[in-house]
Image (tube, rainbow, N blue to C red):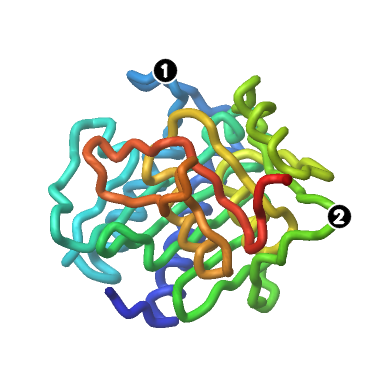
Amino acid sequence: MLNISLDLLTQVGDITKRAGKEIMKVYETDFQVEEKTDKSPVTKADKAAEELIIRSIRSGISNKYPIISEEAFEDGHAPDVTGTPFWLVDPLDGTKEFVNRNGEFTVNIALIDVGKPVLGVIHAPALGLTYWGAEIGVFSQNGDKEERTIACRQAPAGGLTAMVSRSHRGDDMETFLADYNIADEATSGSSIKFCRVAEGHADIYPRIGRTMEWDIAAGHAIVHFAGGNVTDMDGNEMRYGKPGFENPNFIAKGPGVAKAT
């Protein structure tokens, strides 16, 4: 398993912040929205951020490992990741939130080794929030303030706080949540939901529906190293480098979270 240094974690965080600045340049204009083959929205912010991230990883960190990035994958560029560590990049997670201008969109970068995320960084440029996660530690930063260490909380005896998607919710989600002692719910877009679990503001984040590996790998790293876990619905830890890079339904949760008895 790769040994992740604090310097590497910081370098990746700096890349997400620079990508965030490119995104905000577009966010503050009257931008155009295009439609991808899967009918999801895409803007020039997605593409500008992706170009910066890929260029920065290859020139500033290393060209050793392949990069799987959302927009490049959409264009048919999917290098072989068999038997090697690789990067997973979502240059703009939450494009719907970006289009709706509610600020809840992120830049996600993860490094995968032996099917598991060993590094994850999430930056929310409109909110000024950044989260880093690796075995060396899990940190958050608000704007230019000093970074602070974060951790998942133990499941509260009085009931759980569930993170639910602002854009994806249906009857299946209601059925799932009914099995848990939910005292409160909070909504958010993009991978911010993982961060809320990792910093102890929420306890469980289930996702029922289609997601891709680059959507969740950085969040998985942050939750995992903060003391939680991210599993499929059968309790198996999520794996990366799957054919097609598509995920099953999953649950991110803090320690002690279990179904109500």
Tell me the amino acid under the disc marked 1. Answer: Lys
Q: Quadrant of residue 166?
A: top right
Horizontal and vertical percent position of residue 104: 64, 42
Which residue is at the far front? 261
Is tag 1's residue or tag 2's residue first in the polypeptide sequence? 1
Q: Nearer the viewer, mark 1 or mark 2?
A: 2
**Label 1 – label 2 distance at C-alpha:** 41 Å
The picture places residue 48, in percent across and down from the top left corner, at 39, 43
| Residue at x-position 32% and y-position 80% | 3
- Eyeballing the image, is 123 above or below 64? above
Q: Which residue is identified by label 2?
A: 158
The answer to whether residue 69 is left or right of residue 196 is left
Residue shown at the point (42%, 63%) measured from the top left: 15
Vertical placement of residue 83 versus 31, above or below: below
The image shows residue 211 at horizontal and vertical percentages of 43, 35
Tell me if mark 2 has few (under 14), some (14-19) or many (20+) residues whose alpha carbon lies within 10 angstroms of its own. Answer: few
In the picture, the disc for residue 39 is 1
Q: Position of residue 218 (x, y in %)?
A: 45, 56
Q: Could you tell me which secondary element the residue under label 1 belongs to?
A: loop
Is residue 215 depicted above or below 119 in this figure?
above
Name which residue type carries label 2.
Gly
